[in-house]
Image: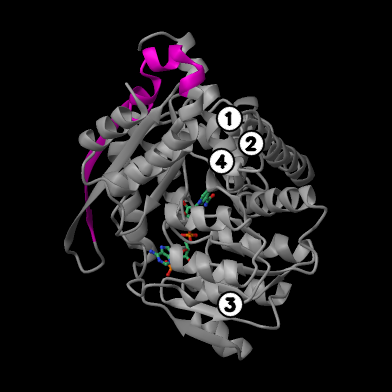
Amino acid sequence: MSFEEILSFVKKRNAHELEFIQAVEEVLLSVAPVLDRHAEYRNLKIFERITEPERLIYFRVNWMDDQGQVQVNRGYRVQMSSAIGPYKGGLRFHPSVTASVLKFLAFEQIFKNALTGLPMGGGKGGSDFDPKGKSDNEVMRFCQAFMSELARHIDDRTDVPAGDIGVGGREIGFLFGAYKKIKNEFSGVLTGKGIGWGGSLIRTEATGYGLIYFAENMMQTKKESLKGKTCLVSGSGNVAQYAIEKIMHFGGKVVTASDSSGFIYDEAGFTPEKLVFLIDLKDVRRGRIKEYADKYKCSFFAVNPKDDFNPLWAVPADCAFPCATQNEVNAKDAEHLVKNKVKLLGEGANMPTSPEAINILIDNGVMYAPGKASNAGGVATSGLEMTQNYMGQNWTREEVDKKLIGIMKTIHDTSLAAAKEYGKPGNYMVGANIAGFLKVAGAMQAQGLI
Ligand code: NDP
């Protein structure tokens, strides 16, 4: 099939799954030269196969709220590819979750996991359940109901889920407890576990830290560093929090953070004390970000997702790190970033930048790091958690951090090398897609038509 035929094949089979098609189109555009060079991958229909989940599990989740009312949600697990290891990828609990969103995330996860160099396949799952505003008991009952079905499809050698939006330490605890009770086994079936019951040091921090290690590697290719740079961060959850910490560690200044209600602009910049307040606000008290602006006397801007641009990305800065959700940087936002001479955009979230916005950034010389490379530190450290669980060992904070730094450098260098080899020097998006694809395609070829 030609490139156009492959794309229309995928579009036809997944009509209405817009996020999934967006993710597939980006990868296909990048790997087209690989398919030209490797006729065997075309003949084996590697791309057509890799865009079809190996298994998509879709289930009902019944649970009871604090008022004694029965609630019904949808649960999913997309087991996308096991070519290079057990399915691996997070669980997302958010009202926007659909099969399309989870398929796009599971598809991206294949290449991201391949880039880490660890033996992990691609998967993703979740529910349209919204933990926001629910009591701890309601979240526990939901997690138990969700796991009562998921448990039959996962184990530590088959499929190892982790957290994502709406699934943090609290949810992983309840999910792990439910799995242990159902299966009567204590294993590394989930990652992101607590320290003391199978978790790895640095896993909580890993996605945000890894993003900033990656960005620092990019800056160094231009003989620059994050030191003294003003940075925009969106989101205020797990990824955003530890990206903020690491930017401060490298001497940068973070002036924004956001949640789904809007963003704060703190011209003086975050400090360690302000970050402690933010983490407590979002993770413990589960409040809204405006409280930060009230406490530190800075500006809060309400944002309506329906507006045609997000003013957060119009704040003057040197670097931008979208760490909230998909498609949060559109073409207009990218124009603002270019106008303000932003040097680098590093994706902490998955697919936060629209295809038009990516083109605008790259065409204007902004260094662009795709999430599947720059946010891979989270899943890489999940892989390290799996290894520690298999070995029955716990590594120190320093050991895990050192491995994370090494993995992010390898992903950076591998992506750059692949981009250069395929005639797109400096294009991290093309490089990451190609390097990830080559590894998985080679494994699929070796394992035959299964
Ligand atoms: P969290 O749930 O911890 O935080 C998500 C943040 O994004 C919150 O501030 C939330 O605001 C905001 N947000 C979520 N949805 C929207 C929306 N539709 N519009 C505006 N803001 C929104 O999630 P994570 O930090 O774990 O994940 C953030 C991103 O990073 C996701 O794209 C995820 O897939 C990706 N990622 C996460 C990894 C991890 O290890 N956690 C690994 C790799 C990628 P509010 O508080 O109002 O809900």
Mark 4 to mark 1: distance in Å? 17 Å
Quadrant of the rendering where the C terminus is positioned: top left
As drawn, the label of residue 435 is 1
Front position in the image: 166 or 347: 347
Q: Mark 2 — residue?
A: 415
Q: Position of residue 250 (x, y in %)?
A: 78, 61
Pointer 4 or 2: first along the chain: 4
Q: Earlier in the sequence, mark 1 or mark 2?
A: 2
Q: Which residue is mark 4?
A: 379
Residue type pointed to by label 3 = Val
37 drawn magenta: yes
**Magenta-drawn segment:** 35-64
Mark 4 within 8 Å of ligand 1, using the beta carbon: yes
Residue 103 in picture, x, y percent from top left? 34, 40
Q: Nearer the viewer, mark 4 or mark 1?
A: 1
| Tag 3–tag 4 contact (CB < 8 Å) | no
Whether pointer 4 and pointer 2 mark residues with C-beta atoms closer than 8 Å, the reply is no
SS at circle 2? helix
- Left or right placement of residue 440 versus residue 99 in this view: right
Is there CB contact under 8 Å for labels 1 and 2? Answer: yes
Q: Secondary structure at mark 3?
A: loop
- Can residue 52 be seen from the camera position used here? no
Which residue, given by chain and number where applicable, does mark 3 sit on? 315
Mark toward the start of the polypeptide (3 vs 4)? 3
Residue at screen point 50% across, 53% down: 359
**Horizontal side, residue 369 vs residue 84: left or right:** right
Give the vertical position of 168 relative to 300 (above or below): above
Q: Nearer the viewer, residue 23 or 449?
A: 23
